Image (cartoon, rainbow, N blue to C red):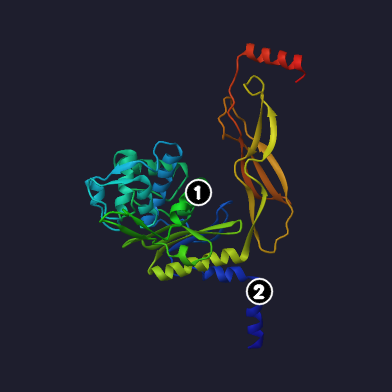
């Protein structure tokens, strides 16, 4: 008996993470834990399984809304007139009335905090003219993000044929939000707030994601529940420079869902660390490009170059740069290569290299004139 016990203990210390990982989310149909910066998967369970995702769908709508604001096509102060279609939406809602006028910012709060279906449809109609056209935008975004196990049939996440995703794809959506549209955290981190203050229709918003109120570092992102999807959650939390994103789908109980997500996050924070090697925008190389308006251009990092490591790791790395073939003109932000991080002979990380400004061709006369000036002034 002692011999068997000794073997079991020894196996635990040899394979501690595997034993723990198998028991992290036993009640979920699917789940994933990723590090936001690198996108590295720390834990997965049936990550590509196609499932209903309920209101996690609204994260795609949030990306589109934030992108429209970023492009200045709409403003937070814009006033939206609510349609009958939007006001008639069932499920979670902020009880919009037909003809009511409400700001884009308040609708975003209604979507992010209370998961309002009526608020989501109102914004879809405001941006695209109809929910159907907005859903087309969502599916275009699905293609751009290369979501292979996802298709959208509505903008709310209500149960409908041909509307599904996977925990891995939801993780990609969540990562797109926190990395490229970090303003989402201004909304998703609100625990409670009032809409329509100063009116007889004052409405109390309370966040459906309870983790932001009691889990250290939690500031988003989205909950979901329908009969088909059961209880779902895409959560994010940041401690120090380490931000984790977790997704669980198909839980039978909201409290169990919350507990398992916290255990998943604890696992990530307790066993890993983020080592940042270079910052976003760092110049990696400067190249000469004759017959262009700039003559030369800096090649810079698209994002921070960081690696997820085990807590006790002391690795030292080297770098390998590969440039792509490119054509002029180039637009600021175009990818022209990649930098690889190697541990020995193994590639352990990479990041895109982009141009830091636009480049266009110039005429032969301008090119000769510039060279003459350079000769005259010793440049």
Residue at 70% in and 49% down: 342
Question: Viewer-proximal residue, 160 or 11?
Answer: 160
Q: CA distance from mark 1 to mark 2?
A: 39 Å
Residue at 45% in and 48% down: 148
- According to the image, label 2 marks what residue? 13
Q: Position of residue 164 (x, y in %)?
A: 37, 53
Q: With respect to residue 286, does 120 lie above or below?
A: below
Q: Is residue 39 left or right of residue 255?
A: right
Question: Viewer-proximal residue, 356 or 109?
Answer: 109
Q: Position of residue 84 (x, y in %)?
A: 22, 47
Do we see residue 164 in this rendering? no
> Total of numbered circles in the picture?
2
For marks 1 and 2, give the one nearer the viewer: 1
- According to the image, label 1 marks what residue? 182
Q: Position of residue 212 (x, y in %)?
A: 47, 62
Quadrant of the snapshot with the N terminus: bottom right
Do we see residue 177 in this rendering? yes
Quadrant of the snapshot with the C terminus: top right
Q: Is residue 201 left or right of residue 187?
A: left
Q: With respect to residue 63, does 300 lie above or below?
A: above
Find residue 80 and report its image quarter. top left
- Label 1 Cα neighbours within 10 Å, binned few <14 / some 14-19 / many ≥20: few
Q: Is residue 28 left or right of residue 354?
A: left
Question: Viewer-proximal residue, 281 or 256?
Answer: 281
């Amino acid at each position: 008996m002692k011999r068997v016990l000794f073997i079991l203990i020894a196996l635990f210390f040899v394979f501690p993470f595997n034993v723990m990982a198998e028991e992290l989310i036993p009640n979920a149909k699917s789940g994933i834990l990723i590090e936001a910066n690198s996108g590295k998967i720390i834990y997965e369970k049936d990550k590509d399984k196609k499932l209903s995702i309920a209101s996690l769908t609204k994260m795609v709508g949030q990306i589109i809304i934030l992108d429209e604001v970023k492009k200045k096509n709409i403003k937070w102060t814009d006033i939206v007139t609510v349609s009958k279609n939007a006001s008639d939406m069932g499920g979670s809602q902020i009880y919009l009335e037909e003809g009511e006028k409400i700001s884009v910012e308040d609708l975003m709060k209604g979507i992010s905090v209370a998961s309002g279906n009526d608020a989501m449809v109102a914004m879809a109609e405001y941006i695209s003219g109809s929910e159907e056209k907005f859903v087309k935008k969502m599916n275009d975004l699905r293609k751009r993000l290369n979501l292979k196990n996802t298709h959208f049939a509505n903008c709310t996440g209500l149960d409908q044929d041909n509307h599904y995703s996977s925990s891995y794809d939801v993780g990609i959506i969540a990562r797109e939000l926190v990395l490229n549209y970090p303003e989402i955290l201004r909304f998703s981190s609100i625990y409670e707030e009032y809409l329509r203050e100063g009116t007889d229709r004052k409405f109390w918003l309370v966040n459906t994601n309870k983790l932001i109120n009691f889990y250290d570092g939690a500031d988003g992102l989205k909950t979901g529940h329908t009969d088909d999807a059961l209880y779902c959650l895409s959560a994010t939390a940041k401690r120090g420079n380490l931000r984790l994103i977790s997704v669980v789908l198909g839980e039978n109980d909201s409290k169990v869902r919350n507990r398992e997500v916290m255990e998943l996050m604890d696992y990530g924070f307790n066993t890993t660390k983020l080592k940042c090697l270079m910052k976003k925008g760092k110049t990696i190389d400067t190249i000469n490009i004759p017959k262009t308006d700039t003559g030369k251009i800096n090649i810079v990092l698209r994002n921070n170059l960081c690696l997820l490591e085990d807590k006790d790791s002391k690795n030292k790395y080297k770098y390998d740069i590969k440039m792509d073939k490119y054509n002029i003109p180039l637009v600021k932000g175009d990818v022209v290569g990649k930098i690889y991080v190697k541990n020995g002979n193994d590639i352990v990380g990479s990041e895109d290299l982009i141009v830091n400004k636009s480049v266009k061709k110039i005429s032969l006369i301008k090119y000769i004139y510039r060279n003459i000036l350079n000769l005259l002034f010793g440049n």
